[in-house]
Image: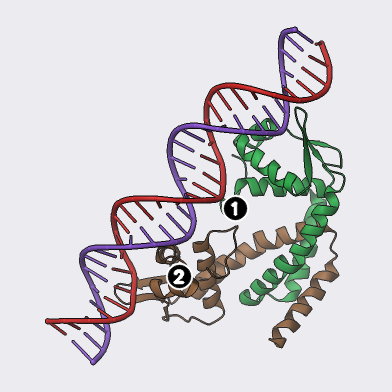
Chain colours: A brown, B green, C red, D purple
DNA sequence: TGCAGTGTATTACATACATAGTACAGTAAA
DNA sequence: TTTACTGTACTATGTATGTAATACACTGCA
């Protein structure tokens, strides 16, 4: 089992990864994503867990199934994910980050410093 | 049942709230926190769930029990929480926030704008 | 056609989480 | 001592999650 957090359901984390893959351009509209068995073996999880993840993304209209062929990224997957993630990020994630900064006494400058630091670390890879 | 997220165990969210209460000064070292039954009724959860939460905080040395009397905030609770939260925030939360900003195409300025906006909203309350 | 690789469905089992109810033991105060 | 709170410790039940194994139906291709 590779690299999953203990505090969140695996199938949810897998769905997040697929979405990240779509946002980053790894998967494009119309692309086929790994089969349930393939991904299960690759990540070292049970195939049923992958199925659960794919069913969730299907219900959200981000991927769609073609029986016997596989799962494919929908045409408007990117827009759906962006809409959803952007509002969640602005309305839930950021306020929580600010609240924690307040509690921990972390100044605003640290935020911009760490951000630049993080960007630099990207170029190093 | 008041106000709990679906994607994280209730007892973990309750522990987080107690820690927030200590960081914000609501609970001070030596203070007694609500009894398991009292908090269970107040939050509309089962007493056993509160127990699980308190046992976790006990193991972390943030609160300690006095049988027959209740649970009390330890003297170094604040330091313990600050150490733990600060490293988690800087090493886990922030990188994840920056990663999401990158994926969502949210510029750095939005971060500082939203932060000021959030600070203003505090004063309005 | 046959075959390998797809999704789909089912059953069984284990663990974590949460609820519900009951009982017992320690403490403080009337 | 009695009473009313505490924490502590059970048993039982149900749901969500994750694993394991098996079977079936569909699609593309040799």
Residue drawn at point x = 73 percent, y = 47 percent: B59
Q: What element does badge 1 sit on? A: loop
In this rendering, is residue A24 above or below C11? below
Percent of width and height locating residue A124: 72, 87
Foreground mark, 2 or 1? 1
Instruction: Please give the name of the residue rendered at 83% of the width and 67% of the height, measured from the top-left corner.
Output: A108
Relative side of A120 to A50, left or right? right
Tell me the chain of label 2.
Answer: A
Quadrant in which residue B71 is drawn: top right
Q: Is residue B104 left or right of residue B82?
A: left
Which mark is on residue B92? none
Determine the secondary structure under disc 2.
loop
Q: Position of residue A22 (x, y in %)?
A: 52, 77
- In the rendered structure, the answer to whether residue B64 lies left or right of residue B13 reads right
Which residue is rendered at x = 82% and y = 53% of the image? Answer: B80
Residue under pointer 1: B8
How busy is the neighbourhood of tag 2: few (under 14 within 10 Å), some, or many (20 plus)? many
């Amino acid at each position: 089992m590779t690299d999953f957090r203990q505090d969140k359901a695996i199938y949810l984390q897998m769905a997040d990864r697929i979405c990240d893959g779509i946002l980053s351009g790894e998967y494009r509209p119309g692309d086929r994503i790994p089969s349930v068995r393939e991904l299960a073996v690759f990540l070292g999880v049970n195939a049923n867990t992958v199925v659960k993840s794919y069913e969730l993304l299907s219900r959200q209209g981000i991927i769609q199934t073609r029986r016997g062929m596989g799962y494919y990224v929908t045409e408007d997957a990117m827009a759906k994910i962006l809409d959803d993630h952007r509002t969640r990020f602005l309305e839930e994630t950021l306020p929580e980050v600010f609240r924690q900064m307040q509690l921990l006494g972390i100044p605003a400058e640290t935020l911009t410093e760490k951000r630049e630091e993080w960007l630099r670390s990207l170029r190093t890879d």
